[in-house]
Image: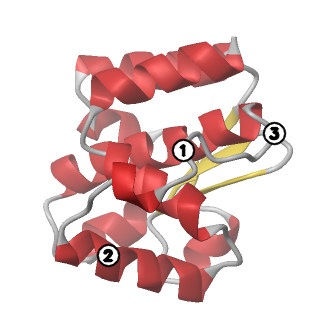
């Protein structure tokens, strides 16, 4: 899988943890046909990274592959929690304006719960917390 080349050792360990938690890791399949999609997680335990879309986006692939892995890992932990958000209030998860815009874009691409998406954007740049969530809810 090409996306593994972009990951830090911590990101690679997270993927191993997800595999141990029975997630099936895929690359450039399904919804990746939509060039706006960088990754997604669906039942039953399918974790997808759209590496080609990230590479063609003009964004730094090292940063965005890693961030996408963490973002989708939050969704994986949410799935392990019965698709229930961890927090109930948006006030506890403040986001900068650009991430608020990203939530709107994500909401337009798929039917997802706004609070679940907010959590994924909040945690995507906090690898230690994402690892904790995966361990807590998936093991």
User: In percent of the image, x 58 and y 51: which residue is there?
Assistant: 88
User: In percent of the image, x 13 and y 60: which residue is there?
Assistant: 60
Q: Quadrant of residue 8?
A: top left
Q: CA distance from mark 3 to mark 2?
A: 25 Å
Q: Nearer the viewer, residue 90 or 48?
A: 90
Quadrant containing the C terminus is: top right
Is 44 located above or below residue 49 in the figure?
above
- The outermost residue toward the bottom is 108
In the visual, does 133 lie left or right of 19? left
Task: Report which residue position mark 3 lands on.
Answer: 82
Sequence-wise first label, 3 or 1: 3
Is 81 located above or below residue 3 in the figure?
above
In the visual, does 88 lie left or right of 8? right
**Label 3 neighbour load within 10 Å: few <14, some 14-19, many 20+:** few
Q: Quadrant of residue 113?
A: bottom right
| Mark linked to residue 87 | 1
Q: Nearer the viewer, residue 45 or 26?
A: 45
**Element at label 2:** helix
């Amino acid at each position: 899988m090409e996306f593994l080349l972009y990951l830090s050792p911590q990101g690679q360990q997270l993927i191993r943890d997800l595999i141990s938690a029975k997630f099936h890791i895929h690359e450039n399949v399904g919804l990746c046909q939509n060039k706006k999609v960088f990754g997604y997680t669906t039942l039953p335990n399918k974790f997808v990274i759209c590496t080609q879309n990230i590479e063609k986006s003009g964004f730094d692939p090292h940063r965005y592959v890693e961030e996408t892995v963490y973002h989708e890992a939050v969704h994986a932990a949410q799935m392990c929690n019965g698709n229930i958000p961890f927090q109930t209030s948006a006030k506890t998860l403040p986001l900068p304006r650009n991430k608020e815009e990203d939530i709107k874009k994500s909401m337009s691409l798929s039917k997802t719960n706004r609070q679940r998406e907010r959590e994924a954007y909040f945690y995507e740049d906090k690898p230690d917390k994402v690892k904790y969530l995966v361990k807590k809810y998936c093991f």
